[in-house]
Image (cartoon, rainbow, N blue to C red):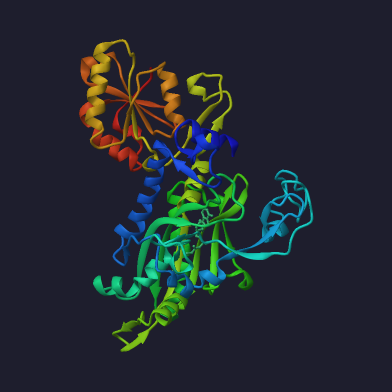
């Protein structure tokens, strides 16, 4: 994990928030490459679950909502974790995590129920700690103006259920999707991007007839798994955890967590819950506005059940990086190098930079001029990077480390016949290709076609 965190910082993927002031626990900023990778992950979610489907629409709700939302949803009374304080060092922990032994191996915790900070075993009695961040709405700071930063995006999809359904003339089954910021004042945090206090969630509320809920639940487990696999996550690194009745959230009838084999062990990546009609009924009752659906076929009003596939984008980002990360001791053979080399085997469509454009030599004006021309031509369509500093081998390795699928080299032959070399990240093989064919070839290679079919093999 340390190597991944170090790569993320060194190569501009992820930085600790406010680092120059000592940083903020469980808050991370996404740097230039991280922001692009994160966006590409979100784009796939949007494409798969909204753009490619007729039955799911997207909304973009506010982070702050009417405080009554959280009363009706049950978050004010139930969205809490058991908190204990170590009587010796006064640090606070989640009681359930201490009991489960989650801190074992951290600092001084050698066994269950032991403080990782001082090794003490004496804790206060657990009390429930609400995880929602509070603030004031407007200039008056009193209890009448308290509002909360949303801990999930789901509620604006329930509250807007009728407006969305009527404005888009949707019939069951249909879904509302949303991706956006969520905030949780977690008692304990850690494992880099795994448990944060500010993060993004991608959620879908899929409304179905109550008697079809079980069928759609199973379908969503399958769709969710397929989505993770498309992001490059191997099936063997995923497993399913069915929540026993006693650990279900207050709104859920059934929940399955999809867990990923992170470097710190299998842990929740995303989940699928059957939230029944809990939320629509709760908001109907609390607001006095009827959030039922009129079933034209059966000529009666029903409260749809909702199946909710949810995932934290930062957890997904971490899983994608962990899966793609490879450290090759002594370097990869073709390069004949001795030093350890890192390669990020990201699926090409996810890579922040698609093509690095490299003149063979920096001090040859004609090569630099031609490389810049090609860079300007390609960057209209692809995220490209121009680099002329260092040996060509070193430049290739810099791109391998950030997962760039293709390196394009402009050499002396380019000046004669308008061809360039394209080197592919994983095989390190090269082809020679005409400049005029580059755009089409690159698009198709990024979509997954074998790069070798776009030109003649080339060895330098
Ligand atoms: N609307 C349902 C819901 O919020 P959840 O299991 O509490 O369910 C959804 O959270 C997803 O959000 C989780 O599966 C996880 O991927 C992510 N998540 C939850 N808490 C998180 C945290 N503190 N930091 C980062 N991601 C988190």
Residue displayed at 38% across by 84% down: 302
Say which quadrant the N terminus sits in: top right
Apparent side of residue 329 relative to residue 100 in the rendered image (left or right) = left
- Image-quadrant location for residue 162: bottom left
Q: Where is residue 388 in the image (x, y as percent from the top left)?
A: 35, 19
Say which quadrant the C terminus sits in: top left
Residue displayed at 26% across by 75% down: 166
Apparent side of residue 253 relative to residue 279 in the rendered image (left or right) = right
Q: Residue furthest bottom?
A: 299
Q: Position of residue 379 (x, y in %)?
A: 26, 33
Q: Is residue 438 above or below residue 369?
A: below
Apparent side of residue 169 relative to residue 233 in the rendered image (left or right) = left
Q: Residue furthest top?
A: 363
- Image-quadrant location for residue 56: bottom left
Q: Where is residue 372 in the image (x, y as percent from the top left)?
A: 25, 22
Q: Is residue 290 above or below residue 57?
A: below
Residue displayed at 72% across by 48% down: 116
């Amino acid at each position: 994990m340390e190597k991944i965190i170090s790569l993320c910082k060194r190569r501009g993927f992820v930085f600790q928030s406010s680092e120059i002031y000592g940083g903020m626990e469980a808050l991370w900023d996404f740097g230039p490459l991280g922001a692009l990778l994160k966006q590409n992950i979100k784009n796939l979610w949007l494409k798969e679950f909204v753009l490619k489907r007729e039955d799911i629409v997207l909304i973009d709700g506010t982070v702050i909502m009417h405080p009554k939302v959280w009363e009706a949803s049950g978050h004010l009374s139930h969205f809490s974790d058991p908190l204990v304080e170590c009587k010796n060092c006064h640090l606070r922990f989640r009681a359930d995590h201490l009991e489960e032994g989650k801190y074992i191996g951290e600092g001084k915790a050698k066994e269950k129920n032991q403080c990782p900070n001082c090794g003490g075993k004496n804790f206060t009695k657990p009390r429930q700690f609400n995880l929602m961040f509070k603030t004031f709405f407007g200039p008056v700071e009193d209890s009448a103006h308290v509002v909360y930063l949303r801990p999930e995006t789901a509620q604006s999809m329930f509250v807007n259920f009728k407006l969305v359904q009527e404005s888009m003339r949707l019939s069951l089954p249909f879904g509302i999707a949303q991706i956006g910021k969520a905030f949780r004042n977690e008692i304990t945090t850690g494992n880099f991007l795994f448990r944060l206090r500010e993060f993004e969630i991608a959620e879908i509320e899929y409304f179905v007839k109550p008697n079809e809920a079980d069928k759609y639940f199973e379908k969503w487990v399958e769709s969710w798994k397929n989505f993770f696999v498309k992001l490059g996550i191997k099936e063997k690194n995923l497993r399913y955890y069915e929540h026993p009745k006693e650990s279900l959230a207050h709104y859920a009838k059934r929940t399955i967590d999809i867990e990923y084999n992170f470097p710190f062990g299998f842990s929740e990546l995303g989940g699928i819950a059957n939230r029944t009609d809990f939320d629509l009924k709760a908001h109907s009752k609390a607001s006095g506005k009827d959030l039922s659906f009129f079933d034209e076929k059966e000529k009666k009003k029903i409260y749809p059940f909702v199946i909710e596939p949810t995932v934290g984008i930062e957890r997904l980002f971490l899983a994608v990086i962990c899966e793609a990360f490879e450290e090759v001791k002594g370097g990869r053979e073709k390069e004949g190098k001795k030093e350890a080399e890192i390669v990020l085997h990201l699926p090409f469509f996810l890579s922040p930079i698609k093509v690095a454009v490299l003149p063979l030599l920096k001090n040859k004006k004609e090569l630099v001029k031609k490389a810049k021309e090609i860079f300007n031509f390609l960057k209209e369509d692809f995220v490209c990077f121009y680099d002329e500093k260092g040996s060509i081998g070193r430049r290739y390795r810099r791109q391998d480390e950030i997962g760039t699928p293709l390196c394009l080299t402009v050499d002396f032959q380019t000046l004669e016949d308008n061809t360039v070399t394209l080197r592919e990240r994983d095989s390190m093989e090269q082809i020679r290709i005409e400049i005029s064919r580059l755009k089409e070839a690159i698009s198709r290679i990024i979509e997954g076609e074998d790069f070798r079919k776009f030109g003649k093999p080339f060895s330098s």
